[in-house]
Image (cartoon, helix red, strand yellow):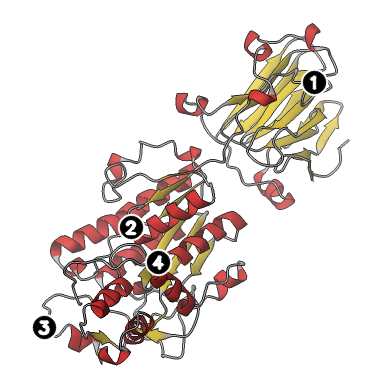
């Protein structure tokens, strides 16, 4: 005989789902597929990537264990016997304290998300309780556990067998009540490159939204030296990795030392990040650049996410190599951007300083694109992660009309109350005529935004973003490189 088909049912605890498992039996006994990734993903179960299978054998009826919330997801089921299962949401949020109780036999399982307290009571002798988890136990992980008393009055679980008659550990008898339990925060993101323009925007936004994150500085995580950090983190304890780090000195990358550094950071370092993300089963967000394209598309066309790369410079080549490593892992968001402007030295800040000092600069007018303000880029990245958008390649800049660097400079002068006519146009070749080493730039850097818009994020018009950016920009005194 066989039970019903594989089905998944949601519960009042977000993310906690009940799985009805087909069990096939005859006079010899029965068989079931306790974990079948392809079928279960198709039915709607998260692809949680189990790494360990544990079995708890309980000889006596009434054995009770819990309530334990651990820093990993679990898939719990019964091999023999039956249990009364109880789950309590101990995560931050509106569902904190919500409970669900279900009887489990071999034909039923439950997926338990990280931070949801898990408990069970055996209803038969010789019950084997089994669970898959997607992280390995470690002392660091144990420090993130949370516990709730089995007899908590606020949750009021109706145990079939009185707890006074049950087999309990001394620890389980003395766990705290709900009022004394600190809600469990979501797993943090790891932000690599937090000192750069995008990294600062990301950490500011994560702080503003109360989203946990860890942002190691370069002394802790130097992307150019993977051997110094690959074994230093409990990667499965992170919600995802956001790589905002890169060697972006495009002209210096054309020198022997710069070339080596660009490849260490933008290619080898990114490949190492991709390795740990794949092994941990967590998403990697990697930020790339318009420099992976040669910019030779007709001026009335934009670059699509699926377009082939054809970098002109060492910087572009190293970034393209990093992209290949990222695209090889299943859970990735590859976000290409252009003309980034954020906190720190950047084109808009330099133009404002020149305007304030009465300098009349020459600015290239044969490179076309759209600026990307770091705050907007950070918003888009967090949107992809929070919305569960399809993994893949996205282009993200601010929206609005396509412009040149010369036109952007003129707009900075105009918005700051200076004469835009003092900004004169020049060509890229003329600008670098007296420079011995410089990287070729794509003349067309316009990125098509359709994919990110279909994912539910509409970038702000760069003209509006520029006004907002200038309103919050402090004028910095000191020498300025007009280049």
CA–CA distance in space, label 3 to label 4: 35 Å
Towards the viewer: 310 or 86? 86
Residue tagged 3: 434
Towards the viewer: 18 or 424? 424
Count residues near mark 2 (Cα–Cα under 10 Å), then give few for <14, some for 14-19, many for 20+: some
**Image location (x, y in percent) of residue 198:** 39, 60
Seen in the picture, residue 480 relative to 79 is either above or below; the reply is below
Disc nearer the start of the sequence (3/4) = 3
Q: Residue at 69% across / 18% down in the picture? A: 65
Q: Secondary structure at mark 2?
A: loop
Answer whether labels 2 and 3 touch (C-beta < 8 Å): no
Residue tagged 4: 472
* Image quarter in which the N terminus is found: top right
Seen in the picture, residue 225 relative to 483 is either above or below; the reply is above
Disc nearer the start of the sequence (2/3) = 2
Answer whether labels 2 and 1 touch (C-beta < 8 Å): no
Q: Secondary structure at mark 4?
A: loop
**Image location (x, y in percent) of residue 300:** 45, 91
CA–CA distance in space, label 4 to label 2: 18 Å
CA–CA distance in space, label 1 to label 3: 82 Å
Towards the viewer: 277 or 420? 420
Answer whether labels 3 and 4 touch (C-beta < 8 Å): no
Q: Which mark is residue 196?
A: 2
Q: Along the horizontal axis of the image, is 236 left or right of 423?
A: right
Residue tagged 1: 81
The mark lying in front, picked from 4 and 2, is 4
């Amino acid at each position: 005989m066989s039970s019903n088909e594989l089905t998944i049912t949601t519960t009042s605890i977000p993310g906690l789902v009940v799985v009805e498992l087909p069990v096939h039996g005859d006079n010899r006994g029965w068989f079931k597929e306790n974990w079948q990734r392809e079928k279960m993903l198709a039915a709607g179960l998260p692809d949680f990537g189990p790494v360990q299978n544990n079995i708890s054998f309980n000889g006596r009826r009434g054995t009770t264990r819990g309530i334990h919330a651990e820093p990993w997801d679990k898939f719990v089921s019964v091999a023999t016997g039956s249990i009364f299962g109880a789950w309590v949401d101990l995560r931050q949020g509106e569902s904190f304290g919500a409970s669900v109780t279900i009887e489990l036999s071999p034909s039923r399982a439950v997926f338990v998300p990280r931070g949801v307290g898990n408990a069970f009571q055996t209803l038969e002798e010789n019950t084997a309780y089994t669970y898959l988890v997607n992280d390995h136990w470690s002392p660091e992980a144990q420090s993130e556990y949370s516990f709730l008393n089995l007899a908590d009055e606020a949750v009021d679980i109706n145990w079939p067998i009185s707890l006074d008659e049950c087999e309990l550990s001394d620890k389980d008898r003395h766990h705290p009540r709900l009022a004394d339990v600190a809600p469990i925060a979501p797993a943090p993101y790891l932000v690599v490159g937090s000192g750069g323009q995008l990294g600062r925007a990301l950490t500011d936004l994560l702080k503003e939204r109360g989203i946990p994150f860890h942002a190691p500085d370069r002394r802790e995580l130097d992307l150019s030296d993977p051997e110094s950090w690959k074994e230093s983190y409990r990667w499965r304890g992170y919600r995802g990795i956001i790589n905002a780090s890169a060697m972006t000195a495009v002209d210096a990358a054309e020198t022997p030392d710069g070339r080596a550094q660009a490849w260490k950071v933008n290619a080898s370092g990114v490949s190492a990040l991709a390795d740990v993300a794949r092994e941990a089963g967590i998403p990697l967000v990697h930020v790339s650049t318009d420099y992976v394209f040669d910019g030779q598309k007709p001026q009335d066309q934009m670059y699509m996410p699926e377009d082939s790369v054809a970098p002109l410079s060492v910087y572009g080549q190293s970034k393209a190599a990093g992209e290949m490593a990222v695209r090889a892992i299943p859970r990735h968001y590859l976000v290409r951007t252009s003309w980034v402007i954020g906190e720190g030295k950047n084109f808009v800040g330099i133009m404002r300083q020149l305007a304030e000092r009465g300098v009349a600069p020459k600015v290239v007018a044969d490179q076309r694109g759209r600026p990307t303000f770091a705050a907007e880029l950070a918003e888009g990245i967090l949107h992809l992660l929070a919305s569960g958008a399809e993994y893949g390649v996205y282009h993200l800049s601010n929206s609005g009309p396509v412009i040149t660097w010369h036109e952007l400079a003129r707009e900075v002068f105009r918005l700051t109350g200076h004469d835009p006519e003092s900004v004169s146009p020049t060509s890229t070749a003329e600008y670098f005529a007296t420079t011995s080493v410089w990287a070729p730039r794509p003349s067309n850097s316009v990125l098509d935004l359709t994919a990110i818009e279909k994912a539910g994020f509409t970038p702000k018009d760069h003209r509006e973003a520029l006004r907002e950016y200038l309103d919050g920009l402090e004028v910095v005194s000191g020498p300025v490189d007009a280049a």
